[in-house]
Image (cartoon, rainbow, N blue to C red):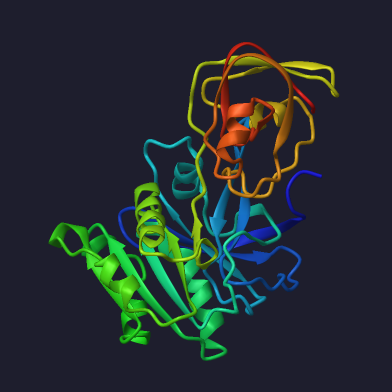
Amino acid sequence: MSGAEKIAVKVTDVVPLNDLVTRFRFERVDGGLLPTFSGGAHTVVEMQDGDITRLNPYSLMSDPMDQTAYTISVRRDDEGRGGSLFMHNNVKVGDEMTISYPVNLFSLDLRAKKHLFLAGGIGITPFLAQIKQLERFNGNWELHYACRTESLGAYVDELTNHHPNEAHIYYDDQEQKIDLVTLLDGQPLGTHVYVCGPKGMIEWVCKTAEAEGWPREAIHYEEFLAPQPGKPFEVKLAVSNKVIQVGEQESLLEAIEREGVDAPYLCRGGACGQCETRVIDYTGHFIHRDHWLEDDEHASGEKIMPCVSRFEGKILVLDR
């Protein structure tokens, strides 16, 4: 079965927060209650953009216990594949859309004595829900949030007004930097670190924490990768007996779905492992971009994550 169960929703609020970020609020079309979720969960939003169906994951930022509505924030990416532009330019109050049930790949480890949050840009959104979850149980947390400029600091006022002692804000254009080594060194035993933001920030936090002796299981991160364009290629699906052309601007997963083949997914961003597919035969080389497979699995040529990875060569046969 592809993806999580679906929910028909209507858009009940659209609020531009700054030049790049807009917040969207969804309620069920049938007026019923939405499922509860845990902080760090995301939903996949379906967008009918002409003949193209776009499916993008967005972190849920509302109170996990509020079943009346979900809210997400979308950062406009003018160089992206079109999903964020569609949300910004086309979606309005009253529209009906389809979203998935919440899926959590970035949950809090509730065994932790303290939760240290590190956010960059739109990466603040999952932490907003996690903070609401922890506040219900007097959880111990601390946030360090890096923004490009004050004008692009989404939710800074809300955070600093409600949590003046826990929320720490840094602005790149003012050359304010997180002193990560000192910050990590000063944490009590049993602290877990969570990071969400640009790829470079995630790598910096993970490598620094590892170098400082932090156990791998105490470091958590979330990054949904957008499929990158590439050279068109052909793939044969052995089970479905189909030969499919994958276009320059579509992912392998999207091409499979376009031909009516049901392919599993949860995140569509290379993080969950749900779409992992066995390679039966190939002549060429893979362009692996996922977070899921280990380096030796990438090198083996036996598996591919069709949501974000591509292929260049003459022959690719998949067990699908």
Q: Quadrant of residue 34?
A: bottom right
Farthest-out residue, front:
213
Q: Compared to 61, does 311 lie above or below?
A: above
Q: Compared to 102, does 159 lie above or below?
A: below
Q: Is residue 35 at all visible to an observer of this figure?
A: yes
Q: Nearer the viewer, residue 97 or 257?
A: 257
What residue is drawn where x is 52% and y is 20%?
Answer: 248
What residue is drawn where x is 52% and y is 73%?
Answer: 129
Q: Is residue 208 left or right of residue 103?
A: left
Q: Nearer the viewer, residue 183 or 70?
A: 183
x and y, in percent, of residue 197 in the image? 40, 56
Q: Is residue 156 at all visible to an observer of this figure?
A: no
Q: Quadrant of residue 142?
A: bottom left
Q: Compared to 150, does 279 lie above or below?
A: above
Q: Is residue 277 left or right of residue 76?
A: right
What residue is drawn where x is 58% and y is 28%?
Answer: 299
x and y, in percent, of residue 201 in the image? 35, 54
Farthest-out residue, top:
314
Q: Quadrant of residue 170?
A: bottom left
**Quadrant position of the C terminus in the picture:** top right
**Quadrant position of the N terminus in the picture:** top right
Q: Is residue 227 left or right of residue 121?
A: right
x and y, in percent, of residue 58 in the image? 54, 55
